[in-house]
Amino acid sequence: MQYTTPRGFRDVLPQEAALRETVSTDIAWAMSAWGYVPVETPIVEFAEVACSLDGGKSGFRLFDSDGEILVLRPDMTVPLARVIATRMRDMEGPLRLRYVGPVFREEASLSGRSREFTQLGVELVGAGGALADAEVLGVLLDALDASGLSDAIVSVGTVAALSAALDATGMDGGWRQSVLSSIHGDDLVGLDALLADPALDADLATSIRRMVRLRGGLEAVDECRRLLMGTGAQAALDELAEAIDILSTSYDVESRIRVDFSLLRSFDYYTGLVFEVFAPGRALSLGGGGRYDDALATWGRPAAAAGFGLSLEAIVAALDPAISRAVDTSAEVVTGGEARMRFARAADERRSSDVAVTLDLDAGVAR
Amino acid sequence: MIARATGKLRIAVPKGSLFAGSVATLAGAGMDVAPLRDLGRHLIASTADVDYYIVRPTDVPTFVANGGADCAICGKDTLLESELSVVELVDLDFGACRFVVAEPAGAHDAIQARYRHHGVLRVATKYPRITAAYYDSIGVQVDIVKLHGNVELAALTGLADRIVDITATGTTLRENDLVVEADVLESTARFVANPASLRTDPRVAGLATALEMHVSNQSKGGHE
């Protein structure tokens, strides 16, 4: 008999659990303030459903007594898409949904990685364009503020610009597929080799090469515009600039938002805005998201959609060094009085004035 | 996840055959590498701005992907084998080697006949993922035997039909009477970065640019 948890899973003891609960609640409040309402989905999904968008990265599979193959959900986006496309199909949009819950990912043995995470996020369904993009980023910035991570940096980009540039090359689908898999694999060396194809316009190739290395402040959007002049990328870049512009009315975008056109992961899934959140000075992504206007169509309910997911574990880890959020788990203790009843009543009175009270059970036995 | 102890840029440098080339390349890109040249048995060499971590080559992707280092120099072969999430930024154009399939000289027809009869080849290698990906791509079914070194022995002793291994000059293969049956892929040293470090620390992208310029000047100069 081994009295440990399986690898990559762990127990959370009261002090940390209280911190997690506080952070989670504060983030939920920030999301609620934008009109996002909670939704819950089961921890298990049919394998067929769970693998429809993620290509089968979900690791934990089980059979039920009907012989169905079930998986522990590897993320929240697919379950949300399912419920939006089915039971919420006829609801008037736009839908503003928030969620929090555990997700499970198989990781290779001896990699030192967790296999259970708590994901917090929102989905904004049935609205597109710069204003909707700005809303999602605004909710994100407020959620970060609420968690105590106002110094987190949000890197934003758009996959639509690269899409348009690739369209402009006129290269065939096989080449394009190779380009996308280099980008998915974060392999800029492989991408350069593909861009060296002699069939490709040399200037356009240079522009794409420079574009995927472009990051900085708002001026990076203008630089990208210059690079991709005449490719059809302008509309996407205008939209990105407009979203950041809208955001700048309420937030210090200079210090919180960084434009980054190298941010192109999960390209096949996102259709426009993409972003990722980093805690400064730590090699740690707190989460990310973007716009995926085509994803719901695969469920038979085409609708514009954008959202993000944050990892509660990553947020708490980023808070940790400073212990910037001491959570009060203390409570007053009422020791025994003359009678059992008075003892309980005294405790009750204190509780109703929002003071935590525990009973001293030994002393509380009235003599 | 490891917190940053200092504000220094943390660069993992592979020990072994890529070490000298790594030091020369970093120097060429304008980095102060003096402490790397006088290392002794230290595992960390520091300048005022940089901590160099001396890492076993196959562990480099693990350090970078998990945030133990911001960036590193690493062989493409190791990157492919690790399948970890790092951003590959610059081909540094040194440490070239190629992956080949090798077999005992003169054994080719016998091995092919055995494959036709048996339907599965047995292949020994230090690089099971690269090997599996290669045989998947050509549609040949193999049983892979993972070894940790002297892989040539597997083919010589009959432990495996063929081996997949790296070769720079082919000398080891020749001396052990093995011949190249097929080319799998070519590898050179790469500059890689942790995705978060690349996006939050401008020094990483700056070093990538400096390395790229150094490599391009080197190749224009016509020497390694």
Image (tube, rainbow, N blue to C red):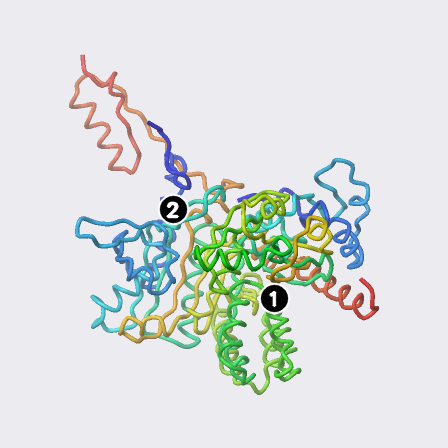
Residue A341 vs A238, above or below: the answer is above
Residue toward you, A265 or A139 = A265
Q: What is the three-letter code of the residue carrying label 1?
A: Leu
The percent coordinates of residue A286 (x first, y second) are: 48, 54
For mark 2, name the chain.
A
Residue toward you, A104 or A245 = A104
Q: Farthest top residue?
A: A367
Q: Which residue is mark 2?
A: A116
Q: What is the three-letter code of the residue carrying label 2?
A: Glu
| Residue in the picture at 45% in, 73% down | A272
Residue toward you, B24 or B203 = B24
Q: Kindly report the distance in space between the C-alpha atoms of the residues bearing marks 2 and 1.
A: 31 Å
Give me the disc on residue A126. Answer: none
For mark 1, name the chain.
A
Label 2 or label 1, whichever comes before in sequence order: 2
Q: Farthest bottom residue?
A: A230
Give me the disc on residue A188. Answer: 1
| Residue in the picture at 77% in, 57% down | B25
**Label tally:** 2
| Residue in the picture at 62% in, 58% down | B100
